[in-house]
Image: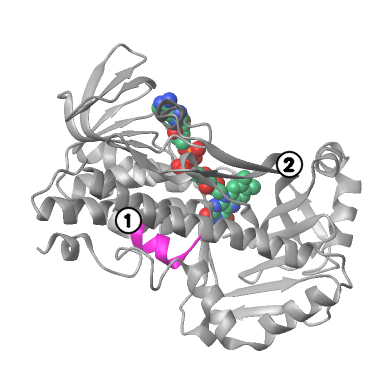
Amino acid sequence: MTNSSYDVAIIGAGMVGATLASLLSRSGFSVALIEAIEPQPFDSRAEVGLRVSAISPGSSAVLDQAGAWKSIIAQRVRPYRRMQIEDGVELDPLLFDAPVFNMERLGTIVENALIQWSAWQVVSSGGMVDIYSPDYLDSLEFCGEQNQVLLNSGKKISARLVVGADGAASRVRKTMGIRQDHYAYNQQALVAVVGKQKPNPGVAWQRFLKEGPLAFLPLADGRSSIVWTTSSAEAGRLLVQDAATFTSELDAASSGWLGRVESLGPRATFPLSMRLSECYASQRTVLMGDAAHVVHPLAGQGVNLGFADAAALVESLIATRLAGADIGSASTLHAYDRWRRSESEAMAFGMHGLRSLFGIESLSPLRRIGLKLVKRSWAVKDVFLQRAAGVGGNAPKLANGATLRDLLGA
Ligand SMILES: Cc1cc2nc3c(=O)[nH]c(=O)nc-3n(C[C@H](O)[C@H](O)[C@H](O)COP(=O)(O)OP(=O)(O)OC[C@H]3O[C@@H](n4cnc5c(N)ncnc54)[C@H](O)[C@@H]3O)c2cc1C
């Protein structure tokens, strides 16, 4: 049984929107979740998917509060305790080891479909969220105390706050009339699942090549998910190359790390860009995840920023409600906008900087000095890791280990 008036209507149940729906409903808000394509059950006996994400410890804490993390780790994941970064010129790699920084793990590699399905299952089985799927946002009217959401099915719902978690091509963002800065890298990421002679020992390995980074991310069965970032022309060539030639080029690019490639799955490419919205909130509507920002995947931070957006919004809305104020008030929206925009802009420009540092011609003195500084300085590595782990100073409380009960003062 559904009603048609809610505290929050979320457009898009990707990894970010589905997680937000669970966090909000567990905090006592009434929630409508609208998703165009109903997620398919995840089958851990099927072949590993091409889309995987490096999930930070901060994000796993958020997913835990959403009720999804236990089901995720019970299925098919691989934690990694070492990050190894090479530039193909310097002999000694840049290493980050979890125990050195008192961390149990640096992150966990999880298939996107598993995250989305686990969060979806929580909201669809609990009966606490009204789900409209398959259905999609047709139009949005901004009016007074409640926004009006018109769905393609003809259904009309109203909400005190609307959330656009509808991905990079966000219709919500376009309806709000929010402009984006868009930087196309003229690069694509080629992804595939690869088995080498030796199993991946739980290391996220990355080598910066002339055209962009090549990453091997560890999978549960010892194979690796590769993300090979290169120029669009080169990615097109690698995508259609016969398997034997592709494999020998991959062997050369990874210089025998873990031996030769022994198995290769299907390949796919994704164009890369940086997109930053000029504003994340107005007119009782907020943006989050890829609807708000898209960053270069070289440090695997895109969806981690989205989970932090979700945790930050929940924190703000609980505090607003406890203070007896309106959850769609301009001051709540303004605070969310400032907090999340500064975080994602810092991350986006950090990625830009890293890309430039490693992308400079291989023997550049500037790059050598930059790399030496990072290698030698424990403090610089510590700051880098805190950011990558999604914890520390500016991270939402849920990412830093607080529970929803803590936020609710229960
Ligand atoms: C090669 C590659 C590797 C990456 N690796 C990492 C990584 O290691 N770590 C990391 O943190 N990030 C990574 N990312 C980024 C990450 O994949 C994205 O940030 C993430 O998928 C965004 O999730 P989202 O939920 O915000 O949006 P989406 O996944 O785009 O979800 C949006 C949802 O909204 C629905 N929708 C859209 N329009 C409507 C509508 N009008 N009505 C209803 N529903 C609608 C869609 O069907 C979809 O389900 C990577 C990206 C790439 C390209």
Sooner in the amino-acid sequence: mark 2 or mark 1: 2
Q: Is the magenta stretch mostly helix, strand or loop?
A: helix
- Is 59 included in the stretch rendered in magenta? yes
Amino acid on which the number 2 mark rests in the picture: Arg
Q: Can residue 37 be seen in this view?
A: no
Q: Is mark 1 on a helix, strand or loop?
A: helix
The location of residue 24, given as percent across then percent down, is: 23, 46
The location of residue 334, given as percent across then percent down, is: 31, 49
Amino acid on which the number 1 mark rests in the picture: Ala
Residue 8's image quarter? top left
Q: Is residue 82 visible?
A: yes
Taking 308 as reference, is 83 above or below it?
below
Crowd tier of the residue under label 1, counting other residues whose Cα lies within 10 Å: few below 14, some 14–19, many 20 or above:
many
Q: Which of marks 2 and 1 is in front?
A: 1
- Colour scheme of the rendered structure: one colour
Q: Are marks 2 and 1 in contact (CB under 8 Å)?
A: no
Task: Name the residue beneath numbered marker 2.
Answer: 267
| Residue placed most toward the observer, 28 or 74 | 28
At x 46% / y 28%, what residue is drawn? 174
Task: Name the residue beneath numbered marker 1.
Answer: 312
At x 25% / y 57%, what residue is drawn? 315
Q: How many marks?
A: 2
Which residues, given as a range, are shown in magenta?
55-63
Identify the image quadrant of the C terminus. bottom left
At x 71% / y 72%, what residue is drawn? 85
